[in-house]
Image (cartoon, helix red, strand yellow):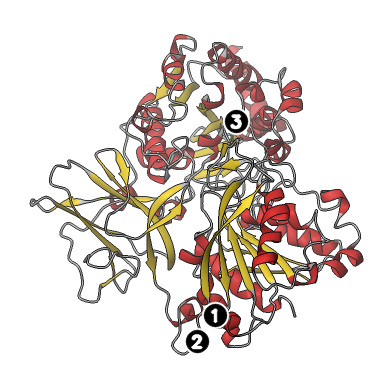
C-alpha cells in the first residue's frame, strides 16, 4: 500500500503545474541579495578589468530598468557594472560574484539582486519605518527612492520572490552603517531587516547568512571610522552575521568611499567568506593578477618625452607614444610609495638607491590630477606643476592629443590675449575662503581674459562669465582648461567674436556636504549660492566699470562646467534681464522639473527662446553626469538647445575644452 501511494505521489509531482514550476528551480543557481548605502551602491568609476563580462555564470537581476544597456527590471542578464542603477559605479558585489564563480564548481551559477541608495538610513529598509522616512529624506535622495517605487525593501523582496522560481537564495550582503554612525539602535534595526527578509522569503538563518562589510578606514582617518566598532560587534546581535574586514582597503580622496581597487579587494573578501561557508576553497579571479602590476623591470622607451606639466629641470614625469606615464622620485627613507592617477593606484618600485619608479597603463588623452602617497601620507609630486583641484592643490599631468588638440594650444602667428589677475571689493557676501568675515568689505580674486586687440583701441566688448567645477578655483579654466588659447585661436580664425571672459572662484572650492544631507537639487542647493549676489551686485558692476564692456544683457553670457553649470542655471534663469546666452559642460543639473523649475521659466518656450539667444549643453560619453535627458525634456517643451556628447571622454577637462570651443562661436552674433 505504501509503495502504491509513493508511485501515485510521484505521478502527481510530475503532472501538476505547480509542481512542474518547483521542478524548474535550479539548485545550482545560488542567489544573493545585496543592499545598503553608497559603498554598496558603488562610488568608483569602473576600469577596464571591471567592465569585461564575467560570462553567463555571474548574473544580475536588475532592480531598475536600464535602457542604455538594454536591461529590464526583473530579467536576468550578465553582471557587468553598474549593478545598482544607471550612472552608479563599481560595487563590492561585482568582485564578490567574480570571486565566487572562480571558487565554485563550473556547474554552479551565481546571481545577485542589488538595491542600494547613497546616504540611506537603515530605517529606509524597515517596512514600518519607510513611510515616515520618505517624508524626511533629504531632497537629493528623492530620485533614488523613486527609482525603487519609494520602497527599496519591497523592491528587494519582490524581485527575490521572483528569483526563487529560478534558484536558491544563499546569502544576504549588506554594506550600510555610515549614516547610522554612533546610533545605539542600529544593530537592532539591522536584525529587524534581516529577520523580515528571512520571514518574507521563508528562509532559514542557518542557511542564509548575513555578510556585512566594514567601512572605509583610511588609516583611522575615515569620515565614518566611528562606525567600525559597531559593525565589528554586529555578530553579538545577529549570530549568523559575518563581518567582512576592510583593513587596508584603499579609499577615494573623500575618505568616505572606497576607490576601484578598494571595491575589488572588499568584494573579493565577501566572495572568499561566502565560498568558505559553502564548503569551497576560495580562489581569486585570474584577471586580478594583472591589476595594478608594474613591469618587473621598468624601462623607459626612447620615444618617451618629458610631460608638458613637468617642472623644468626634472627628467620625470614622462609620457611615451602608448600614453603610458613614467614617474620617479627620490625618497631613501620611504618604505612604500604609491602613485594615484586616474583613480588607479600603482606601487612604485624601489631601485635600491633611494629612488622609486612606476609606469602606468595607457592613460586617456587630456589633463589628469594625480597624487603620490608615501607611507600613508598623500602629497604632491615635487616634479610636477600644481593645479587647484580635488579641493586642494594637486599634481597634474597632460597626456597630449595629436593635431586635433591644436585648438587649445598656442599657435605661431596667432595674436595672444591676456589673462589678468584682479582683486575687487565685495559687500554682498562676507565670506573669505568659506569663513564668515566681520569686515564691511571683502576683497575677492578673479581672472579676466581680454582679447589681443583689446590694447589697440577703444572698442567695447561683450562678456562671458565662465565658472569652473566643484573643488576647483578661478585658475582652472586658464591652467587646466587652456581657455585663453581656445579663445585666441577661435578669434584669429573668425570663429568667435572678440570677447572678455571673467572667471571667479564661485565659493565652490570647499567640498559639498553630502554627508550632512544637503540638497544638490537645482535651485535648492545652498552650495555656491553665496556667490550669486556677489556676481550680480559686485563682480559684474566692477567689470563694467573697469573694462570696456557692452554692459547690457544682449552682450552678457554665462557658462560653467559641472557645478559651474549648476550655478549657471541658477543665475541666468532667475536673471533673464541680465543674461541672453548660456551654456553648461557636464552641468550638475539635478532634480530639475523642466515644467515648473525657476517659476516655470521653460513653460513658455516662445518667450524663453526670445530672451535666450543661444543655449548649449555638452557632456562626455563616459561622463557620470550626462545632460541628454534634460535636453530631451527641454526640446519636448519647444526650448531651443544645442547639445553634444564628447566621444571617449568622461568628467574631465578635455570634455570641457571641447564644450567651450563648440559654445563660443555662437555667442554675440
Horizontal and vertical percent position of residue 386: 37, 57
| Residue 488: image tag | 1
Q: Using residue 664 as the reference point, say whether residue 30 is left or right of it.
A: left
Secondary structure, mark 3, is loop
Which residue bears the numbered disc 3? 516
Q: Residue at x 8, y 50 (%)?
A: 352
- Is residue 571 shown above or below 663? above
Disc 3 from disc 1: Cα separation: 43 Å
The answer, for residue 393, to whether it is visible in the render is yes
| Residue 414: image tag | 2
- Sequence order check: which comes first, mark 1 or mark 2? 2
Query: Which is closer to the viewer, label 3 or label 1?
Result: 1
Can you tell which quarter of the image residue 108 is in? Answer: top left
State the quadrant of the C terminus.
bottom right
Which residue in the rendered view is the most extreme toward the left?
A: 353
Q: Residues within 10 Å of mark 1 (few under 14, many from 20)?
A: many
Disc 3 from disc 2: Cα separation: 49 Å
Which residue in the rendered view is the most extreme toward the bottom?
A: 413
Query: Which is closer to the viewer, label 3 or label 2?
Result: 2
Can you tell which quarter of the image residue 18 is in? Answer: top right
- Is residue 495 shown above or below 215? below
| Residue 506: image tag | none
Q: Residues within 10 Å of mark 2 (few under 14, many from 20)?
A: some
- Sequence order check: which comes first, mark 3 or mark 1? 1
The answer, for residue 7, to whether it is visible in the render is no
Horizontal and vertical percent position of residue 477: 53, 64
Which residue is nearer to you in this view: 31 or 321? 321
Q: Residues within 10 Å of mark 3 (few under 14, many from 20)?
A: few
Secondary structure, mark 1, is helix
- Sequence order check: which comes first, mark 3 or mark 2? 2
Amino acid at each position: 500500500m505504501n509503495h502504491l501511494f509513493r508511485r501515485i505521489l510521484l505521478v502527481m509531482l510530475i503532472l501538476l503545474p505547480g509542481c512542474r514550476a518547483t521542478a524548474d528551480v535550479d539548485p545550482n543557481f545560488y542567489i544573493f541579495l545585496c543592499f545598503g548605502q553608497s559603498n554598496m551602491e558603488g562610488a568608483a568609476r569602473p576600469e577596464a578589468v571591471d567592465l569585461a563580462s564575467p560570462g553567463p555564470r555571474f548574473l544580475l537581476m536588475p532592480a531598475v530598468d536600464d535602457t542604455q544597456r538594454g536591461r529590464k527590471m526583473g530579467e536576468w542578464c550578465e553582471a557587468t557594472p553598474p549593478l545598482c542603477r544607471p550612472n552608479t559605479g563599481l560595487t563590492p558585489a561585482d568582485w564578490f560574484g567574480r570571486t565566487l564563480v572562480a571558487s565554485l564548481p563550473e556547474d554552479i551559477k551565481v546571481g545577485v539582486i542589488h538595491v542600494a541608495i547613497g546616504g540611506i538610513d537603515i530605517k529606509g529598509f524597515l517596512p514600518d519605518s519607510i513611510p515616515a522616512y520618505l517624508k524626511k529624506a533629504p531632497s537629493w535622495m528623492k530620485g533614488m527612492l523613486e527609482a525603487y517605487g519609494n520602497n527599496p525593501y519591497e523592491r528587494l523582496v519582490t524581485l527575490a520572490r521572483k528569483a526563487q522560481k529560478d534558484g536558491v537564495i544563499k546569502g544576504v550582503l549588506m554594506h550600510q552603517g555610515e549614516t547610522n554612525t554612533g546610533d545605539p539602535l542600529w544593530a537592532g534595526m539591522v536584525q529587524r531587516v534581516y529577520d523580515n527578509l528571512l520571514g518574507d522569503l521563508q528562509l532559514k538563518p542557518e542557511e542564509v547568512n548575513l555578510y556585512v562589510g566594514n567601512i572605509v578606514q583610511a588609516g583611522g582617518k575615515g569620515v565614518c571610522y566611528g562606525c567600525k566598532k559597531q559593525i565589528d560587534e554586529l555578530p553579538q546581535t545577529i549570530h549568523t552575521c559575518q563581518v567582512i574586514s576592510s583593513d587596508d582597503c584603499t579609499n577615494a580622496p573623500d575618505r568616505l568611499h572606497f576607490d576601484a581597487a578598494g571595491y575589488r579587494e572588499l568584494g573579493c573578501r565577501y566572495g572568499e567568506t561566502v565560498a568558505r561557508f559553502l564548503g569551497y576553497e576560495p580562489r581569486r579571479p585570474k584577471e586580478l593578477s594583472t591589476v595594478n602590476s608594474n613591469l618587473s623591470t621598468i624601462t623607459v622607451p626612447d620615444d618617451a618625452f618629458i610631460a608638458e606639466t613637468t617642472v623644468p629641470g626634472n627628467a620625470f614625469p614622462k609620457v611615451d607614444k602608448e600614453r603610458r606615464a613614467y614617474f620617479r622620485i627620490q625618497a631613501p627613507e620611504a618604505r612604500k610609495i604609491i602613485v594615484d592617477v586616474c583613480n588607479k593606484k600603482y606601487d612604485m618600485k624601489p631601485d635600491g638607491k633611494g629612488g622609486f619608479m612606476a609606469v602606468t597603463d595607457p592613460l586617456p588623452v587630456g589633463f589628469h590630477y594625480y597624487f603620490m602617497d608615501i607611507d600613508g601620507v598623500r602629497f604632491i609630486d615635487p616634479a610636477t606643476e600644481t593645479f587647484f583641484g580635488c579641493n586642494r592643490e594637486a599634481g597634474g599631468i597632460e597626456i597630449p592629443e595629436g593635431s586635433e588638440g591644436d585648438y587649445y594650444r598656442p599657435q605661431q602667428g596667432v595674436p595672444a590675449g591676456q589673462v589678468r589677475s584682479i582683486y575687487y571689493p565685495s559687500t554682498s557676501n562676507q565670506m573669505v575662503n568659506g569663513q564668515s568675515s566681520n569686515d564691511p568689505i571683502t576683497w575677492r580674486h578673479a581672472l579676466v581674459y581680454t582679447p589681443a586687440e583689446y590694447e589697440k583701441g577703444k572698442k567695447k566688448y561683450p562678456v562671458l562669465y565662465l565658472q569652473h567645477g566643484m573643488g576647483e578655483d578661478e585658475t582652472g579654466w586658464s591652467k587646466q582648461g587652456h581657455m585663453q588659447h581656445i579663445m585666441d585661436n577661435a578669434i584669429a580664425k573668425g570663429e568667435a567674436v572678440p570677447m572678455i571672459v571673467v572667471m571667479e572662484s564661485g565659493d565652490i572650492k570647499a567640498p559639498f556636504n553630502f554627508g550632512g544631507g544637503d540638497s544638490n537639487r537645482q535651485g535648492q542647493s545652498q552650495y555656491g549660492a553665496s556667490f550669486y549676489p556677489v556676481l550680480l551686485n559686485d563682480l559684474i558692476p566692477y567689470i563694467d566699470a573697469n573694462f570696456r564692456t557692452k554692459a547690457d544683457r544682449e552682450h552678457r553670457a554665462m557658462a560653467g562646467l559641472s557645478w559651474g553649470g549648476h550655478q549657471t542655471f541658477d543665475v541666468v534663469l532667475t536673471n533673464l534681464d541680465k543674461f541672453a546666452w548660456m551654456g553648461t559642460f557636464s552641468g550638475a543639473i539635478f532634480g530639475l522639473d523642466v515644467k515648473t523649475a525657476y517659476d516655470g521659466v521653460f513653460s513658455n518656450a516662445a518667450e524663453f527662446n526670445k530672451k535666450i539667444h543661444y543655449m548649449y549643453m555638452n557632456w562626455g560619453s563616459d561622463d557620470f553626469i550626462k545632460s541628454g535627458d534634460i535636453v530631451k525634456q527641454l526640446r519636448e517643451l519647444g526650448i531651443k538647445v544645442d547639445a553634444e556628447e564628447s566621444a571617449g571622454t568622461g568628467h574631465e577637462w578635455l570634455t570641457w575644452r571641447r564644450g567651450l570651443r563648440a559654445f563660443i562661436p555662437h555667442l554675440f552674433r
